[in-house]
Amino acid sequence: MACSSFVKLNAASSSWIAGHHSVNHRTGSAARFPTRRADELVKTAKSIASPGRGILAIDESNATCGKRLGSIGLDNTETNRQAYRQLLLTTPGLGDYISGAILFEETLYQSTTDGNKFVDCLRDQNIVPGIKVDKGLVPLPGSNNESWCQGLDGLASRSAEYYKQGARFAKWRTVVSIPCGPSALAVKEAAWGLARYAAISQDNGLVPIVEPEILLDGDHPIERTLQVAEQVWSEVFYYLAENNVTFEGILLKPSMVTPGAEHKEKASPDTIANYTLTMLKRRVPPAVPGIMFLSGGQSEVEATLNLNAMNQSPNPWHVSFSYARALQNTVLKTWQGRPENIEAAQKSLLVRAKANSLAQLGKYSAEGESEEAKKGMFVKGYTY
């Protein structure tokens, strides 16, 4: 059954490429911008997609950050959120492995307790500041209990302000659920919303991270994930082209192609790498500078092993990471909200960042990893 469905997918892919051949040639939309602005977008994207480096995602909403703090017994206050983000963003040597940091709006405007702006702390380490710009998921009427992402209203003016504050790239997360279908309506809504956001971001000097997360929820096999991922990414690139988005000035944040979290068989890193790269090669133009994977509830070690497997041979794009929980889990548990643990917590962040840096270069080994780093973090129906 798996083999026959794979053949059908190949046929479907060929048909899509033939039917949308002109779309992949519509990357020369830099004429929308002054040359300086277009050059800046491309330079920013290439800086983030630099060898051996990836993105630290600390753009959790205040509510989600509160859940993280609550897991170590801390109250969800601005002071505690600031203390945790200060720990992360002032880690000595972080820029050796991290090229960009996605911030929540509160963090973009915050400073350290010594009065240094967080954006300046990042720039001092050659880390590009980024900003989460979406306004979260809400129910999509007319769908199969699915969601759409809100936040386009006022996005242009907000993006202009974020740029003034020092942000140089943006992130917009929408989701697709395989157990819910996904419906054609939900896929189209996700793709169109991402494309409009990407065009608005570029117009305001921000490199857009394009993130249609295909949720891990479900008991489906890896072949089904591949089928849905190809469907989603074909729609996304169709609408990106329709909106004259410059492909050289974007980054992608896809899910890895894995079986559903409740599927009876786990896939090896080599299998996940094979299916994921198959999808990317069928759907993503080589003009895109970087593919920065989300971890989506995988354990710290799983996310790193899978990334490493994808970098065992050359790819047309920089294949790297944009992890949140898979970089922060051990850090939080080491810190415990205690000042005397800050140095140890920062060292644990460097351990994870270095591991993923090595994985981006295809040189990672899981030898010596802790049992904590091997624990899965999937939460059914997880909300950010």
Image (tube, grey):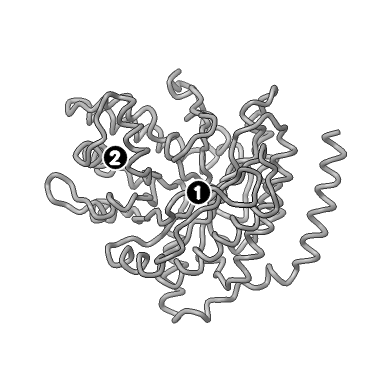
Which mark is on residue 202? none
159 over 175 or under it: above or below = below
Of circles 1 and 2, which is in front?
A: 1
**Coordinates of residue 34 in the picture (x, y in percent):** 44, 81
Q: Mark 2 and mark 1 in contact (Cβ < 8 Å)?
A: no
Kind of residue at disc 2: Leu
93 over 121 or under it: above or below = above
Horizontally, residue 288 falls left or right of residue 183, namely left
- Report the residue at 37% width, 49% height from top: 101
Mark 2 — residue?
88
Horizontally, residue 224 falls left or right of residue 86, namely right
Q: Give the class, few, some or many, for how many residues have Cα within 10 Å of label 2's Cα (few <14, many ≥20).
A: many
Residue 3 position by quadrant: top right
Quarter in which the N terminus is drawn: top right
Horizontally, residue 10 falls left or right of residue 228, namely right
Q: Residue furthest top?
A: 371
Give the distance between the C-alpha atoms of the residues marked 1 and 2, in whole angstroms: 30 Å
Residue 352 position by quadrant: top left
Quarter in which the C terminus is drawn: top left
Q: Residue furthest left?
A: 114
**Coordinates of residue 172 in the picture (x, y in percent):** 47, 54
For label 1, the SS is strand
Kind of residue at disc 1: Val
For label 2, the SS is helix
